[in-house]
Image (tube, rainbow, N blue to C red):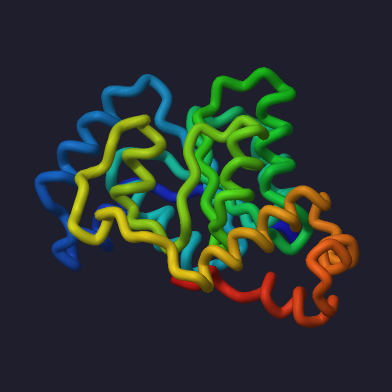
Amino acid sequence: MALVTSLGRDSAAGALDRRGWFNDRAADLESHVRARPDRTVLLLDGDALSRHRLGRALAIRGFEPTLADTVGGAVAAIETATPAFAVIETRLADGSGLAVLKALKAAGADTRVVVLTEQSSIASAVAAMKAGADDYLAKPADAEVVACALLGEPPVKTLSQAYRPMSVARIRWEHIQMVYELCGHNVSETARRLKMHRRTLQRILQKRAPQ
């Protein structure tokens, strides 16, 4: 059964305030969000912990989140009310989150969409942008970074965001992901083109991207 819930800003603010998570940057972001006439955001994520943590963090920054854990639940939420913003996970139990993105675009919605995924790759990022995503982030993503992406503003850069060349393992993984995208996520065809055993490929696809 699909889960769709809404988070009240007051309850979220209380939880975050008790932990002392407010800072000047968050307050500044909140003022930017609250200046928007429509602050609704659809958050689609199959991981309950990640979904609720990010939902509370976005609520404290002034957004009005509606949470969904399946493609079906997200589509139902959109049919009820079109959100101004959306954060969409790509891999869900009942399909790809990109189906929700395509549904928004097909309806002519002016929703700003940020795609969020654990399986971050250049190929999947290109696929998301072609589908109409406004931004693409790898999980776990800091709430501030997500909020900035939703607003179309650059996040504060840190030393950890400095350029680092990809490792050999990452280059190999990126190549596999590119072929996987070109094959329309068909594992058997991808394995054939890569001259790789199907089970070996499945194990690689299930793992997180190497650093």
Q: Is residue 143 above or below residue 101?
A: below
Q: How many marks?
A: 0
Q: Is residue 176 above or below residue 133?
A: below
Expressed as whole percent of the image width and height from the top left, the position of residue 79 reads 71, 32
Expressed as whole percent of the image width and height from the top left, the position of residue 92 reads 69, 59
Expressed as whole percent of the image width and height from the top left, the position of residue 28 reads 16, 37
Query: Between 40 and 143, which is closer to the camera in this rendering?
Result: 143
Query: Between 192 and 180, which is closer to the camera in this rendering?
Result: 192
Judge left or right: residue 22 versus residue 137.
Answer: left
Query: Between 2 and 155, which is closer to the camera in this rendering?
Result: 155
Image quadrant where residue 173 sits: bottom right
Quarter that holds the N terminus: bottom right
Judge left or right: residue 52 versus residue 76.
Answer: left
Quarter that holds the C terminus: bottom left
Q: Which residue is at 25% across, 54% downward?
A: 162
Looking at the image, which residue sits at the far left? 24
Q: Which residue is at 36% across, 30% downward?
A: 152
The reply to whether residue 181 is visible in this rendering is: yes
Q: Which residue is at 51% across, 67% downward?
A: 170
Expressed as whole percent of the image width and height from the top left, the position of residue 65 reads 46, 44
Judge left or right: residue 101 versus residue 43.
Answer: right
Image quadrant where residue 56 sits: bottom left
Judge left or right: residue 12 versus residue 100.
Answer: left
Q: Which residue is at 38% across, 39% downward?
A: 149
Image quadrant where residue 54 sits: bottom left
Q: Is residue 84 above or below residue 94?
A: above
